[in-house]
Amino acid sequence: MQTFEAGVALDPAPRRRPAIPVVEGSPTEHACQNADRARALRDDCFSVFPPVLRPLLPVSDKIARYWLRRSASPYVHEIDEIADRLGFPGVWMLNNSYQWGCTALAREEDGVPWLARSLDWPFPGLGRHTDIVRTKGSAGAYFNVTWPGYVGVLTAMAPGRFAACLNQAPMWRRTQHAWLRPYDMAANSIDTFARVRDIPPDQLLRQVFEECPDYGRARMKLEQTPVARPVIYALIGCAPGQSCVIERTETEFTTREGETSAANDWLPQRPGWEARMSASRFLKNAPEDAAAHCESRRFGLAQWDGRLSAPGFAWLKPPVLNGYTRLAVTMSPACSSLRVAGFELQGQDLPEQVTEISEIGL
């Protein structure tokens, strides 16, 4: 595995933060050469669970492995090898966690498409354990913002081709009461486990970066390939007009080009679907509160009037920045530019930047 020199835009804060590693290799090489960091990520993520539940991790791993092996995942052999070589439970669970809350915005500046995204997830460690991995597929190389042991793609940029990210889609509701959300979540999961055999959305995004030579074919594959769960993709190319948000159910899609911002709800909203919300709001808030929270993040980023190409992350401020923000990323395949920083809660209400701002510029 080759290590790259990343350009680092120094933050004005006096304390020194660690740089995000920038390396080259396959997901298997990445995981096996960073086994200690993979274990640290596993331990950090599962620290949020009560101690009584942690012994159930091997059981959860077996359930995740059983479903993934029956799915249309083309990368099961990689997960199998990673889990075997790392030798601790949690790898299968990590690779079955493709539902991530996020906010994204695609915008053109001087005719050049740019994509900004924040990744929000309640688990600690995702910010401090982030890597940028340069991987090669049949269509060319791409930079994947990822973690040791994870084989899918949530955020990536392929220089000269396209950039894309994945957002968690709203949840299908069989009921309406806030206290019945756990029932709906469990029912949706059981239905996927028992019935659905399609590719996980994050693994489809990896397949697109490996196989698609341009924006048009990437868009077509993201629109038309059946997926295991609903998902929202934000995609940009290199030419003017190459920006879109693709809202996916398992077998259908809606693509919008005029309003290229997204959070965790359909735009416009659809009957029967509920926007995703934070865990602290999960059992308390009505569906309209969840929708309002998502809309405030989407609108907050869409109305930001600065330049995404400018250094730093001036666009990352409340409500886009929230208690679960773990990553901030801006990227442009036309400029071969990728800028990443990790965030973690440090005792305050809002996360703090815990890594240097690492920037790839080719």
Image (cartoon, helix red, strand yellow):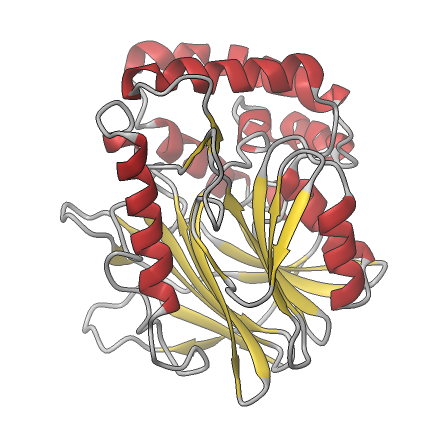
Q: Residue at x 70, y 49 (%)?
A: 206
In this rendering, is residue 298 above or below 303?
Answer: above
Nearer to us in this view, 349 or 10: 349
Q: Residue at x 40, y 83 (%)?
A: 310
Residue at 41%, 45% in the rendered image: 126
214 sits to left or right of 179: right
Q: Is residue 7 above or below residue 163?
A: below
Q: How many marks?
A: 0
**Residue 33 placement, left or right of 358:** right
Give the quadrant of residue 45.
Answer: top left
Which residue sits furthest bottom? 110
Residue 135 in percent (x, y) is at 71, 58
Residue 226 x/y as whole percent = 74, 36
Q: Residue furthest right?
A: 138
Instruction: Decide which of 81, 115 is in the foreground and name it.
Output: 115
Whether residue 285 appears in this view of the structure is yes
- In the rendered structure, the answer to whether residue 346 lies left or right of residue 57 reads left
The quarter of the picture where the N terminus appears is bottom right
